[in-house]
């Protein structure tokens, strides 16, 4: 009988790190694509997917809400982001790296990033802050407008994986196209059991993270590092709630329930 794993889905912005590079770079991408000199970007970003954010920005700036325009803004944003992040004032949040080191070394745990960012944007941020190697895959907000749908599709993709370790070539899975792996690629995965059995915990900093965990029957560890207060998060009934991730012993105890 295979042992159960603890599948931990980490949000990125406001949970692992803080940076304003997304808003700033999206403004530049809109300016580049639409030639609007001062695009309106003062909308809520926290807890949302990039799909929904870009769609609203197109609407607010009276630009065509078409797939062609959406793709143009996305592509411009992703091209500008690697350079922009080097000029940003982003910071890694307290306790994050120490916690990830401990969890990655625990054979009972598998770590994934589940984020509203485009998957490619998430990888840029994780790489810049030195976090990319802690996660087996990144699942991003490329296609879903709602965080709940992102969580549901993430869980489906995780269940479709034949193994949660790296392939024989050392390549990790891109969560944006896990379902599109062809037979040759998927045969690289080492099958260690017929059926993956796991418990799931979402770690995030917004009410949307709590709600999406409930939508997939997962537990949620909420953290007050992204702008929401303890009281604001508590009213959404997370399973556990911390001011930050500095106390690794207590956080790990809460993750295991």
Image: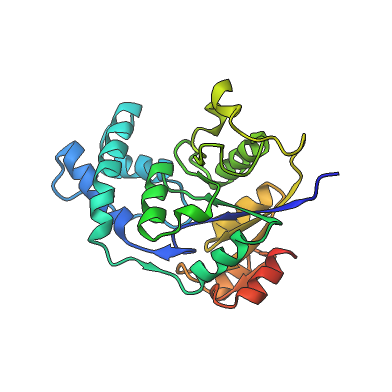
Whether residue 5 is visible here, answered yes or no, is: yes
| 211 or 200, nearer to the observer | 200
- Check the image and tell me how it is coloured: rainbow
Residue lying furthest top: 183
Q: Residue at x 76, y 38 (%)?
A: 193
Q: Residue at x 49, y 67 (%)?
A: 97
> Is residue 122 rendered to the left or right of residue 20?
right
On the image, the x and y values in percent for residue 250 come to 66, 76
Q: Residue at x 32, y 40 (%)?
A: 59
> Is residue 118 rendered to the left or right of residue 165?
left
> Is residue 157 rendered to the left or right of residue 21?
right
On the image, the x and y values in percent for residue 257 come to 75, 65
Snapshot quadrant of residue 204? bottom right
Whether residue 182 is visible here, answered yes or no, is: no
Snapshot quadrant of residue 155? top right
| 183 or 12, nearer to the observer | 183
On the image, the x and y values in percent for residue 103 come to 61, 62
Circle count: 0
Q: Residue at x 74, y 48 (%)?
A: 198
Residue lying furthest front: 168
> Is residue 59 rendered to the left or right of residue 50?
left
* Up-down relation of residue 38 to residue 206 (above or below): above
* Up-down relation of residue 207 to residue 157 (above or below): below
Quadrant where the N terminus sits is: top right
On the image, the x and y values in percent for residue 63 come to 26, 36
């Amino acid at each position: 009988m295979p042992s159960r794993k603890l599948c931990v889905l980490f949000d990125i912005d406001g949970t692992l790190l803080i940076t304003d590079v997304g808003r700033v770079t999206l403004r530049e991408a809109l300016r580049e694509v639409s030639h609007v000199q001062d695009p309106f970007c003062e909308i809520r970003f926290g807890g949302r997917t990039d799909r929904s954010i870009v769609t609203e920005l197109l609407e607010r700036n009276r630009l065509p809400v078409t797939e062609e325009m959406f793709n143009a803004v996305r592509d411009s944003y992703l091209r500008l982001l690697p350079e922009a992040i080097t000029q940003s004032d982003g910071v890694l949040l307290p306790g994050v790296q120490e916690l990830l080191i401990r969890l990655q070394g625990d054979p009972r745990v598998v770590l994934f990033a589940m984020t509203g960012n485009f998957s490619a944007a998430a990888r840029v941020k994780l790489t810049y802050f030195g976090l990319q190697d802690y996660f087996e895959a990144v699942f991003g907000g490329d296609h879903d407008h709602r965080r709940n749908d992102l969580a549901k599709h993430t869980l489906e993709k995780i269940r479709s994986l034949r193994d949660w370790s790296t392939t024989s070539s050392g390549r990790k899975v891109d969560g944006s196209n896990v379902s599109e792996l062809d037979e040759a690629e998927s045969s690289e995965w080492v099958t260690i059991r017929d059926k993956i059995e796991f418990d799931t915990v979402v770690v995030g900093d917004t009410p949307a993270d709590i709600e999406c965990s409930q939508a997939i029957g997962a537990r949620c560890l909420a953290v007050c590092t992204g702008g929401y207060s303890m009281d604001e998060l508590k009213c959404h009934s997370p399973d556990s709630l911390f001011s930050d991730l500095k106390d690794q012993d207590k956080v790990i105890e809460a993750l295991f329930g």
